[in-house]
Image (tube, rainbow, N blue to C red):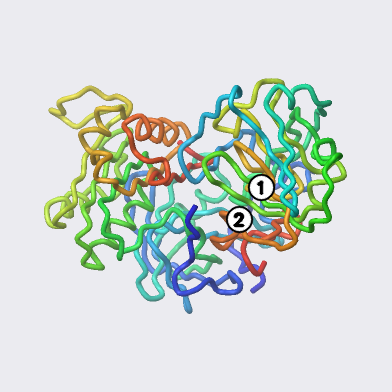
Amino acid sequence: MARAAVPGGLSPRLVWRAARLVEFRDETPSARTLVFDVPDWPGHLPGQHVDVRLTAEDGYSTERSYSIATPADGTRVALTVQLVQDGEVSPYLTQTLSVGDVIELRGPVGGWFVWRPADTAPVLLIGGGSGVVPLMAMIRARRAAGSKALFRLIYSARTPEDRYYADELRTRARDDFGLDVSYVYTRKTPEGWPLPPRRLGVADVNNGGWPPDFQPACFVCGPTGFVEAVADILIALGHDARRVKTERFGPSGT
Amino acid sequence: MGGIVSPGFRGRRGVEGGEVRLPPGQYLTEDFPVLTAGPTLRVPTDTWEFVIVTETGEKHRWDWQQLMALPSERPTVDLHCVTKWSKLHTSWQGVSLDVLLEGVDTAADYAMVHSYGGYTTNLPYEDLLHGQAWIAYKFDGEDLTPEHGGPARLLVPHLYLWKSAKWVRGITLTDEDTPGFWESAGYHDYGDPWREQRYQGD
């Protein structure tokens, strides 16, 4: 297995940093992108995540991990957080946290599920639900770096209204040369969609992905069941397991 | 930096946590989340083997039937994942590393655990001994599923769960400590949840 070094050298210690919310936007009725200003942020690679720590007035604190939604951009770090109704942290982040508020985060974390803009191999991104977040960071990084690597995204969402970044993906699919985007809807499709709602299957991966011969780098992110199914499909289609990188959501998976 | 307070944030302690003591930064889950860097491996038991290689190159090999014939234990342990979830009172069945290492002549200080599929993780040799580690093949009374590392995984619950290598196929005993898969990617060399050793430098 490859040694996955963290860019710029791993800092000796991942320190907690103050992160000030500078803007937010709602991606769906239950998901919000939070843009933080983090002084001295060391930079990151698309696909990496951060740990967020919230502390209550009596000193109780808890931590969660969130994928970074944007490529490295100075001191700006954007997360897209899905509201989990009975969650401990996501209701605070998506409903209470206001511009100017400061929380703590540390990172970047994870040197495996990353795409490096210097990589020229075709890329296949398959995201389920909020699993699209780190994949979006890769799509944005591709454009920001002027990469010509061929990208395909297959995005499985429950309904059209549940898609994150819908407008931006529509624009990028048109303007980012070499980026294709296809969708699968599991509960409700848009008007006039040629297929009924269904789970992502072999045909979707076959049609929306790359042939194994192209040796694409595959990134699969989403809830556990989704990732298990997609990774099995990729292997069955003949993709090399070593080129299939996965990130599974744990207990808060939808 | 010590805890910036978020006004209005209360958290959920006492709701599901109750009086339970968790390592710092962890929260309770009733699920059993899956965390793996790649596709789930399906390793058949008829070709399965487990090999311990000592620092002198001496090999000790068990096939599946031989593993099944060894005395097993049924530990109930708490699991702590570096991604923050903890799952308490999980019940397993497996063979203690004390049993497997009984006839192994070694003075090694470190161990590198190898899995089918190429995953590796390192830990001190001592942490495999004294009832702290098992080759586990049943979870909750059922055969361990491939998603959770079946047919057999290492179980070292006193360390973060990435040390409990899924689809385990062997352990190499060495004099020198070498980082494994996640340890090379910035995760802590030892990984004690109670000291919150998540990342290098923690």
Q: Residue at x 38, y 43 (%)?
A: A220
Q: Are marks 1 and 2 on the same chain?
A: yes
Q: What residue did someone put label 1 on?
A: B113
Which residue extends farthest bottom?
Answer: A40
Identified by mark 1, the residue type is Val
Rendered residue at 62%/62% (across/down): B199
Closer-to-camera residue (B185/A144): B185
Disc 1 vs disc 2: Cβ atoms closer than 8 Å?
yes
User: Is residue A138 found left or right of B166 in the rendered image?
Assistant: left
Q: Residues within 10 Å of mark 2 (few under 14, many from 20)?
A: many
Label 2 is found on which chain of the structure?
B
- The quadrant of the image that shows the C terminus of chain A is top left
For label 2, the SS is loop
In the picture, the disc for residue A248 is none
Q: Residue at 71% across / 35% down in the picture?
A: B61
N-terminal label among 1 and 2: 1
Give coordinates of residue B124: x percent, y percent: 76, 56
Which disc number belongs to residue B180?
A: 2
The residue sitting at 35% across, 72% down in the picture is: A73
Residue A100 position within the rendered picture, expressed as x and y whole percent measured from the top left: 45, 70
Residue A252 is situated, as x and y percent measured from the top left of the image, at 52, 40
